[in-house]
Image: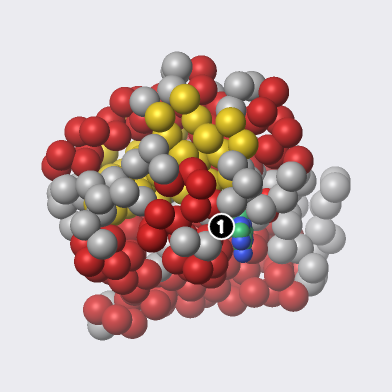
Amino acid sequence: MHVGFIGLGAMGQGMAANLLSAGHTVTVWNRSQAPLDALKSQGAHIAETPAQVASGGVVLSMLADDAAVRAVLLDGGVLDALPTGGVHVNHATISVRLARELSDLHTARDVHYVAAPVFGRPDMAAAGKLHVVCAGDRNSLERVQPLFDAVGQRTWPLGDDPVRASVAKIAGNFMLASAIESMAEASALTRAHGIEAADFLEIMTQTLFAAPAYQGYGKLIAESRYEPAGFPVRLGFKDVGLALEAGDDARVPLPFAGVAREALLEALAGGGGERDWASLATVAARRANLDDRDKN
Ligand code: NAP
């Protein structure tokens, strides 16, 4: 399939590379140059402008946040350049409000919007092992399934309203933030009483919390390893904010999200925006007057 791909950040680079490996013809655009050079050497075509990637009729985007999506997809003319009947697949984690707006804007232009946010960090993106949560009209979902097969290990369809996929992703990341914050606070507690975080977290993640989220982030906390970030505090703060906003709109209180937001804001204020959000453990440690154990 001929596809355009916009946004070659930590996630997009691996995803675009896997589309190429699966035999698709991929034209890429990115704001900065370095990732373009890497993809070119793997066989991608390079577009001069974002709108150029739309000519084939199928565009995938993996941009950072709402502002980037607005700047590139709307102001950058990608949506306007999609031919009638074209499909835009948005893999980024964006607000429910923007998901709704994009859905309407696409419909008004006779093009299709598929929301397909993903679970999995950059290593899983590079390995083609993402979980793709998607929603959009049935024909479009069928059309882009081979692309999902190239980037992911499993697709989780959620119906025809794209907003549903966006809200599921936001809710999932809120659960991750809660898991990290609870491990951060609990390991500060054990450390204050003489038990190393690594010893405590090994027990928990081999017994009651033997799940990938706890095991993956528990290991980062146990090893105080926060750089390079798989998922930076900057993006975690964005996502918890998206959960709170979606909760406000639907009148759903999310008290834990408020706690996680404050901790992430504290990490940001301390200059830690580019560290992995597992570094919430250092915020909890500081609050308990424990040393940071920061090996970075
Ligand atoms: P990232 O490494 O920060 O990459 C962001 C991408 O957006 C880059 O291509 C960047 O271009 C581009 N961008 C940002 N602002 C822009 C603007 N104003 N105009 C044009 N381009 C802009 O982020 P990521 O980790 O790949 O994440 C991408 C999306 O996936 C986010 O919505 C994130 O929440 C979600 N996500 C991330 C993970 C993860 O573990 N990292 C997992 C699941 C979902 P430059 O290269 O020029 O900076």
233 left or right, relative to 269? left
Indicate whether 132 appears above or below 259: above
Q: Residue at x 16, y 48 (%)?
A: 137
Q: Which residue corresponds to mark 1? A: 64
Indicate whether 184 appears above or below 67: above
Q: Label 1 amino acid?
A: Ala
The image position of residue 65, as x and y in percent, is 52, 63
41 left or right, relative to 128? right
From the viewer's side, name the closer residue of 178 and 191.
178
Q: Residue at x 26, y 62 (%)?
A: 109
The image position of residue 145, as x and y in percent, is 28, 31
Q: Does mark 1's beta carbon lie closer than 8 Å to ligand 1? A: yes
Instruction: Classify residue 281 by image quadrant.
Output: bottom right
The image position of residue 197, as x and y in percent, is 68, 47
Q: Residues within 10 Å of mark 1 (few under 14, many from 20)?
A: many
Q: Residue at x 36, y 25 (%)?
A: 1
From the viewer's side, name the closer residue of 184 and 19.
19
Q: Residue at x 51, y 22 (%)?
A: 20
189 left or right, relative to 295? left
Q: Is residue 265 visible?
A: yes
